[in-house]
Amino acid sequence: MKLFFSLFLVISLISSCSTGELEKKTTSTIPVKNHSFSNVDSIYTKHLHLDLKVDFTEKKISGVARHQMINSGTKRAIFDIKGLKILKVTTGDVNNETNRKYEIGKETNNKILGKPLIVDIDKNTAFVNIYYETTKESEALDWLDSTLTSSKEKPFLYTQGQAILTRTWIPIQDVPSNRITYSADLSVPSDLLAVMSASNPKVKNKEGMYHFEMKQAIPCYLIALAVGDLVYGDLGNQTGVYCEPELIDDCVYEFKELPDMMKVAEDLYGEYAWEQYDLLILPYSFPFGGMENPRLTFANPTLIAGDRSLVSVIAHELAHSWSGNLVTNETWNDFWLNEGFTVYFENRIMEEIIGKSKADDLALIEFFELEEELERISKSAHPEDAHLFLNLEGRDPDDGMTDVAYVKGAFFLKTLENRVGRDKMDVFLQSYFNHFKFTSVNTEKFVAYLEKELLKKYDIGFNYKEWIYEAGIPSNALVIESKGFERIKLMAEDISKHKLSELENKFSLADRDSYSVQEWLTFLRHLSSNISAERMKVLDESLQFSAWTNAEIQFEWFLKSISSNYTPAYPYLSAFLEKVGRRKFILPLYEALYNNKATKEKALSWFDNYKQNYHAVSRNSIARALHLKN
Ligand code: BES
Ligand code: ZN
């Protein structure tokens, strides 16, 4: 009787496997590789088809992810999932599907990685179909009520996949080393347009049904979706911009140089591989300046400064069409191969668009930021984060998103260029992109290629090992000088020396135009660290920094306002934090508020009030910085 009873228990346990309730019962430990549980070495997705419905009332995406896979003969396929509700898994072609057993592993590290979805398959299975729904925990998704859009009339949804958030809206093998093509059929509310990192519609249709194709193979962190009240503006030469209707004129003006940037980029490193290049201007909550989703860069509206002063971010995202999207970092430890190359490339584009001396100013601002970042990293729990090649095992890949990958990476290439000469450098990079196109590279492969195709070939010595595998900035780093910056630094240092009465007559609003935005940024950064609130007030009255609507200027001004307790700026700061969700700005602002005794409470109460306006990427980072549970 006892035996019979336990047998019954075992059988019922096994049979419940196919119902999707097994989470509690799984004990197996799945190895983690490249921030993923997936067994891509045995079976990998080649093409993904998404059949999804976007439901704004429930704030939920539901449907099926159909994986067409190459199976080397394994009997289980493992996917990454996080914050997803799995409803059913089948194998086989559409209309010929068989239900399959699956397990959802309970792993210890799941705060970062989520969980493995383990599906029983046959050794010749090639189609795995996962029926699922997203949940409130699907961190890639930002569901915006209409109040957070520009028109305040229609809701908005967008996704952010990089680095490992695609698994929070699609069950997938979430590694940058595997490339897939994808297609999608989406059903969305009929008053909204859906766009993806794929071939895109230009206008709405009354059924709200859209079909998408991405025919070039991409790493899955680049799958992206946005749904909103969008219109399209053509910028010429296979470029354009999607945005909310009332922004279209401003966008077309701001991003007018896009076709020129494209031409410069193609002249440098070869033909653009993705046919069309459009921008999508998202609501202010978007956590980044830009995100290089192929064919459709996602961009933050803070880039619309009105004077094209912040378009280098667009040059950056365009550059990713080569560095990152065409040649992809194989693991997140090799992130500098994406970002360092892109910052270098971005600056080469800007050199042609705005001229060498202004492009140098842009690079120099980045270099100052790198120096500050390295200072912080050297005192942190992970001083080895100052290496270009990282070790992010067991950590959130987000931790690798520092100026080291971006700026130290770019200065490595700038210094190399300076050593070998621009001609050889350009030929080398052209052949690098061509040789590795549509594949992933790691640091070791890059080093081997560098040795063979550049250094050995021309018998040139270069300390690349020091750059890549050691901390700090090597002493041969290229030095950039800027006369404009030297002048404005002196002007900034002077501010604390003047009598207040002298300062009152020093500037007027018209002086804003005498210097570039980058020069003003340098001015603000070089104001004395203990400048008084009175002096800040005089500067504000003459130059109106608090009311300046350039987000980069606002950011620097607010930082100074917090450190000097210049309280008249706080209503502007509060409004900025309420509206803007770009992490690069708001995280340091919250940190500064929190670390100043006088404003610590403000940091907490503002965050509490505004956090629902932010994407999870920003919200989680700030919650951590403010020592809040999230
Ligand atoms: N790919 C990045 C954004 C990113 C990196 C998202 C890692 C998630 C994980 C994008 O290209 C980027 O670097 N954006 C920068 C722009 C810049 C450095 C010009 C940004 O948003 O500030
Ligand atoms: Zn980038």
Image (cartoon, rainbow, N blue to C red):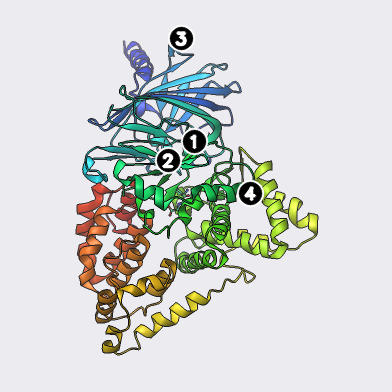
**Is residue 347 at all visible to an observer of this figure?**
yes
Q: Tag 3, which secondary structure?
A: loop
Are the two marked residues, 2 and 1, in contact with CB atoms closer than 8 angstroms?
A: yes
The image position of residue 287, as x and y in percent, is: 36, 49
Q: Which mark is residue 161?
A: 2
Q: What is the spatial separation of the Cα atoms under label 2 and label 1, in whole angstroms?
A: 8 Å
Question: Alpha-carbon neighbours of circle 2 within 10 Å: few (<14), some, or many (≥20)?
Answer: many
Q: Which mark is residue 267?
A: 4
Q: What is the spatial separation of the Cα atoms under label 3 and label 1, in whole angstroms?
A: 27 Å
* Residue 504, placed above or below residue 403: below
Q: Tag 1, which secondary structure?
A: helix
User: Where does label 3 land, which residue?
Assistant: 96
* Residue 5, placed above or below residue 272: above
In terms of sequence position, does the residue under pointer 2 or pointer 1 come before the other?
2
The image position of residue 9, as x and y in percent, is: 33, 16
Identity of the residue drawn at 37% across and 78% down: 527
Q: Tag 4, which secondary structure?
A: helix
User: Amino acid type of disc 2?
Assistant: Gly
Identity of the residue drawn at 41% across and 37% down: 107
| Relative horizontal placement of residue 57, taking residue 112 as reference (left or right) | left
Q: What is the spatial separation of the Cα atoms under label 4 and label 3, in whole angstroms?
A: 49 Å
Identity of the residue drawn at 37% across and 73% down: 524
Q: What is the spatial separation of the Cα atoms under label 4 and label 1, in whole angstroms?
A: 28 Å
In terms of sequence position, does the residue under pointer 4 or pointer 3 come before the other?
3
In terms of sequence position, does the residue under pointer 4 or pointer 2 come before the other?
2
Q: What is the spatial separation of the Cα atoms under label 2 and label 3, in whole angstroms?
A: 31 Å
